[in-house]
Amino acid sequence: MSKDLFKRGEEIRNEVLGEAYVKNSAAVTDAFSEPMRTFAIKNLWGDIWDRPGLDRRSRSMINLAMLAAMDRPAELKIHLRGALNNGVTRDEIQEIFLQVALYCGVPTGSDATRVARLFFAEFDAEKASA
């Protein structure tokens, strides 16, 4: 079963984050970080992201709010890509961060907005060069 969770997790990661991101992530993994990567792929992606209770779009929206609220800009950037790939619009992302600002404070919402603005510029440049 563990092997199946890992395999399914890799499939979902590729679908949500994109093949290029997943390949790069694997390429920079070393012996120290491999156990964490494997744990996340099996449990996060292979189990939770594959559950039927929420669709991927909803999971992405929840992740954006949680990661913004917890001030996790590196993970937020990764999940902005996933959210766009899962059909969340930039307008919806803007609304999510306004909601975060209301409940978690304006600095938190502003930081998330800043991360998204920078990510969108990178994402757009990436798409234009592809």
Image: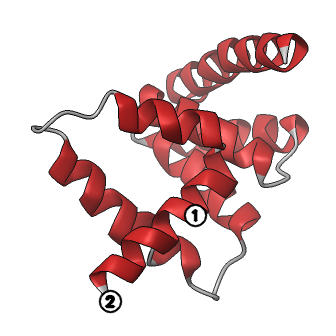
| CA gap, disc 1 and disc 2 | 15 Å
Q: How many marks?
A: 2
Count residues near mark 2 (Cα–Cα under 10 Å), then give few for <14, some for 14-19, many for 20+.
few
**Vertical relation: 67 (above or below) 125:** below
Disc 1 marks a residue whose amino acid type is: Glu
Seen from the viewer's position, the closer of residues 92 and 82 is: 82
Give the residue displayed 89% in from the left and 13% down from the top.
Answer: 128
The residue labelled by disc 1 is 11
Locate residue 61 relative to residue 111 in the image: left or right.
Answer: right
Colour option used: secondary structure
> Crowding near pointer 1: few (<14 within 10 Å), some, many (20+)?
some
Q: Name the image quarter holding the N terminus.
A: bottom left
Residue hosting label 2: 1
The residue depicted at 71 percent of the width and 47 percent of the height is 83
Type of amino acid at the residue the image marks with label 2? Met
**Residue 99 in which image quadrant:** top right
Residue 45 coordinates in the image, percent (x, y): 47, 65
Could you tell me if residue 60 is visible in this image?
yes
The quarter of the displayed image where residue 62 is located:
bottom right
